[in-house]
Image (cartoon, grey):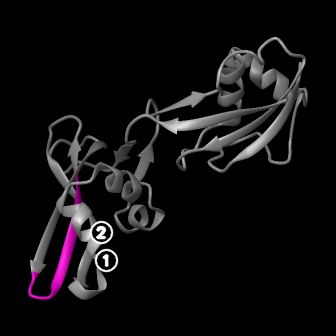
Amino acid sequence: MLNSWVVVPTCLPTVLRRCHTCSSERFRANGKFRVNANHKLLDAWLLVLCTVCGDTAKLTVLERTNVRSVRPELLDRMHDNDPGLAAELVQDPVLRRRNRIALDWEGAWRLDTGGSDHLDREVIDVSVRFAARIPVRPVRLIAEGCGLARAEAERLITEGRPVSAVRLSGKLSDDFAFTLKR
């Protein structure tokens, strides 16, 4: 029987960027946008707040963009401060590269295993799906999903007990599957 595990975001990740006021490096996206029009050109920013001093920083979403080239739905979502749009944009690789930011997902996701009926089996087949591009070490997912200590999960990987088409070292953010033999 195939078990389906899902890595689900619980909140927006922390934005890693240096604060000009207090030198902290952690910001929280609160889902607010600022849109500025200058004749037929638009600028739009996603606002992020420093976790230490509360200072606001702007992440550029649109820069000197012609109004006609912006989808009306996108503009409406920015005017409405849509938290779903903020979540989409903060994960967008183009926006992250443009604004020179990184994301810290620590404490911003959970693993949904669909129950614990698989814990007593000798062999389990698992399909791991990511609801968002959250980089997680497979050893952490195996440990958490199977109720093991991280050291025990690392030992199993070293012994080659989980078999997968992808490497189980490093971090993954794409869907994968594995078979674990205890």
Q: Is residue 136 left or right of residue 105?
A: right
Residue labelled with disc 1: 71
- Identify which residue, 103 or 120, lies in the foreground: 120
Magenta residues, start to end: 38-47
Residue labelled with disc 2: 74
Estimate the x, y position of residue 130 in percent, counting from the top left: 60, 44
Residue depicted at 14% across the width and 45% down the height:
55
- Most frequent secondary structure within the magenta stretch: strand
Whether residue 87 is in magenta: the answer is no
Which secondary structure, mark 1?
loop
Residue depicted at 74% across the width and 40% down the height:
169
Residue depicted at 17% across the width and 41% down the height:
22
Type of amino acid under label 2: Leu
Whether residue 42 is in magenta: the answer is yes
Q: Is residue 43 left or right of residue 2?
A: left
The quarter of the picture where residue 86 lies is: bottom left
